Image (cartoon, rainbow, N blue to C red):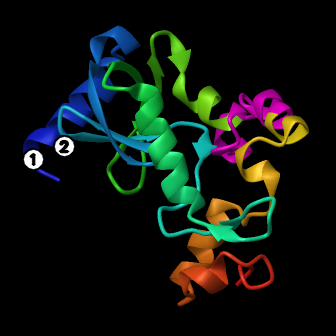
Amino acid sequence: MSRISAALIVAIVSSGALADDFVGQASVIDGDTLEVHGVRIRLWGIDAPESSQLCRGEDSLQYRCGTQAANELDAFIARRPVNCSPVSLDPYGRMVATCSVAGRDIGDWLVRGGLALDWRQYSKGRYHEGQREAERNGQGLWKGSYVEPWLYRACMRAGGKPSACSDDANAHP
């Protein structure tokens, strides 16, 4: 990360800037990470499957659920301006923020579409109802089976491979 980007993040977070203070065209990095004005932004309170992660659809066949989440997010944003309200910095130096497009909370949209999970450890349940709705309606991840993204990452850090870490039996290191 460049010094300018790091300085911009620190200035935005420390200033308590509101969502309207950080607006711009977003590039989708993955299902829960955007880049706006050269700054990486991790969406607060949710966790989407990783780009290399596989899930099983209702037909039991594996598909790249992380890639699907990123592609659908990109289509949802559709080059419209994204408004982000910084919350904090994560351990990797990324800004953590709630972001919206045309007044719609992106995290809520992802969770209600079954493309991401409510990460209750951080969200304190903000997206819980949306997740229950996605599960009831069999949206996205809820059509088949998946491994929680945080377990997938732990399995990968322990030396696993994407196909094995995407299988629930192997994802628990």
Residue at the far front: name it. 59
- State the mark number for residue 6: 2
Quarter-of-image position of residue 36: top left
Q: Mark 1 points at which residue?
A: 3
Q: Is residue 32 in view from this perspective? A: no
Residue at the image position 47 percent from the left and 28 percent from the top = 76
Magenta-span inclusion, residue 152: no
Residue 106, given in percent of the width and then of the height, sits at 53, 27
In front of the other: 66 or 158: 66
Quarter-of-image position of residue 57: bottom right
In the picture provided, is 65 more to the left or to the right than 170? left
In front of the other: 17 or 128: 128
Residues drawn in magenta:
112-133
Mark 2 surroundings: few (<14), some (14-19) or many (≥20) residues within 10 A: some
Residue at the far right: name it. 136
Q: Could you say whether the residue bearing mark 1 is in a helix, strand or loop? A: helix
Residue at the image position 78 percent from the left and 76 percent from the top = 168
Residue 32, given in percent of the width and then of the height, sits at 49, 45
Magenta-span inclusion, residue 115: yes
Residue at the image position 61 percent from the left and 42 percent from the top = 46
Label 1 amino acid? Arg
In front of the other: 90 or 147: 147
Residue at the image position 80 percent from the left and 64 percent from the top = 59
